[in-house]
Image (cartoon, rainbow, N blue to C red):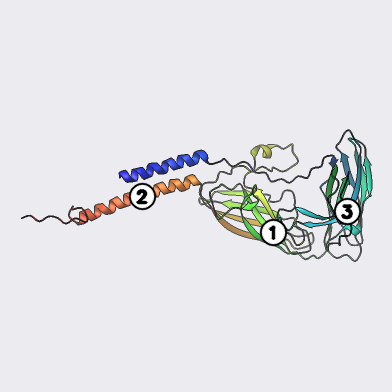
Amino acid sequence: MKHFGGIALASVAVLIAAASVLPIASAATETERVSSSALGIAPKKQYEIEPGKSVDDKLTIRNIDNSAPLELTLRVVDFTYDSSQDSGVAKFFLDQNAEKTPWSLRSYMSVPQTVSIAPGETKSVDISIAIPQEQGAGSLYSAIVYSSGSGGTNGSTNVGLSASGVTLVFANVPGKVHEDLRLEKLGPYDKIAKQYMPYITTAMPQSIGYTLKNSGNWAEAPVGSITVKGWFGRSMVIENINPAKSLVLIGQTRTFSSCIKYDEKEVANTRSNTSPTTCVDPGLWPGHYSVTANLFYGANGNETRELVKTVGFWYLPLWFIIALIIVLLIAAWHIRKFVRAIRRKRNGGVKFGRTPKRRR
């Protein structure tokens, strides 16, 4: 008993020490921002244009610098996704002689080559997109790159450093398109490390990730919900898994993530036009959880398709594991004590393993 007492006290000491040194997980945010030193622009433009039709629009550009004029050069370039990442980072083809991508929009888009903006002022410039009659259904996209200051040489390096920015332009050509979006992976996700968490995790998940692969010819913006359900029937539902309407580009494999629980202050801030982005502790209990994703996608005029996937994971924090070990040690000691008592009783009260002395 003394031996076991020493083990139990040591285990409790380890538990207290672990609780004192374990770091408190900081809140993660699910936001992507593009900033510029002196330029304010729209990050994305999206249109639906029928074959043989055109669209005229305005680009609003703001000179954030109140002390100096802004001289901009505008270029239309193609882009794709960065294959070394799966978080939706765009990769631009800045070389003047770069070949067109299969989804290129630059031959059909017209923008001014230069624009001058006075300090602190805003200017609107014309943009037009004309889709040829023979163009088939699908998604087309390119980017407008704004640059000023000193750029690279031969058009093959980064844009100017004093002010730069990009507007992604998407044109969906309606019709019968080939859509093929697959849900490759689902599970608890570490937004800071940008990776999925293991099947058995000691850290409480704050967000759920899902990875989609687009093998069609239409840039997809998935919608739907994700349900996290625990042992005792407690469920938490992520209602809007893609509030920013982010796209999975043609040929891209992209990972999205959504908070299980958002910061209540951001949720209550009805004055803000942006969706909440900060993940907080969802208050999960130790145990097994199932994650079910119900996602939908589909171009206008085409069949809406559903993606359903269910996975599971164990959340076993360190304090719970140590407490469980202590309980098992106590249970093992009591079982051993009980077994020894039964053996003594069967041997007529004589301790097990000893031969009674014969009387002379």
Which residue is label 3 attached to?
155
Q: Earlier in the sequence, mark 3 or mark 1?
A: 3
Which callout, 3 or 1, points to the residue nearer the camera?
A: 3
The answer to whether 89 is drawn above or below residue 179 in the figure is above
Q: Residue 320 vs residue 263: left or right?
A: left
- Circle on res. 212: 1
Amino acid bearing label 3: Gly
**Residue extending furthest toward the top:** 67
Q: Residue 29, can we see it? A: yes
- The front one of 46 and 313 is 313
Which residue is label 2 attached to?
331
Amino acid bearing label 2: Ala
- The reply to whether the C-beta atoms of the residues labelled 2 and 1 are less than 8 Å apart is no
Q: Residue 130, can we see it? A: no
> Alpha carbon of mark 2 to alpha carbon of mark 1: how far?
47 Å
**Whole-percent x, y for residue 304 in the image:** 73, 61
In terms of image quadrants, where is residue 176? bottom right
- The front one of 71 and 51 is 71
**Whole-percent x, y for residue 22 in the image:** 53, 41
Q: Quadrant of the C terminus?
A: bottom left
Q: Secondary structure at mark 3?
A: loop
**Whole-percent x, y for residue 256 in the image:** 69, 53
Amino acid bearing label 1: Leu
> Alpha carbon of mark 3 to alpha carbon of mark 2: how far?
73 Å
The answer to whether 59 is drawn above or below residue 253 in the figure is above
> Alpha carbon of mark 3 to alpha carbon of mark 1: how far?
33 Å
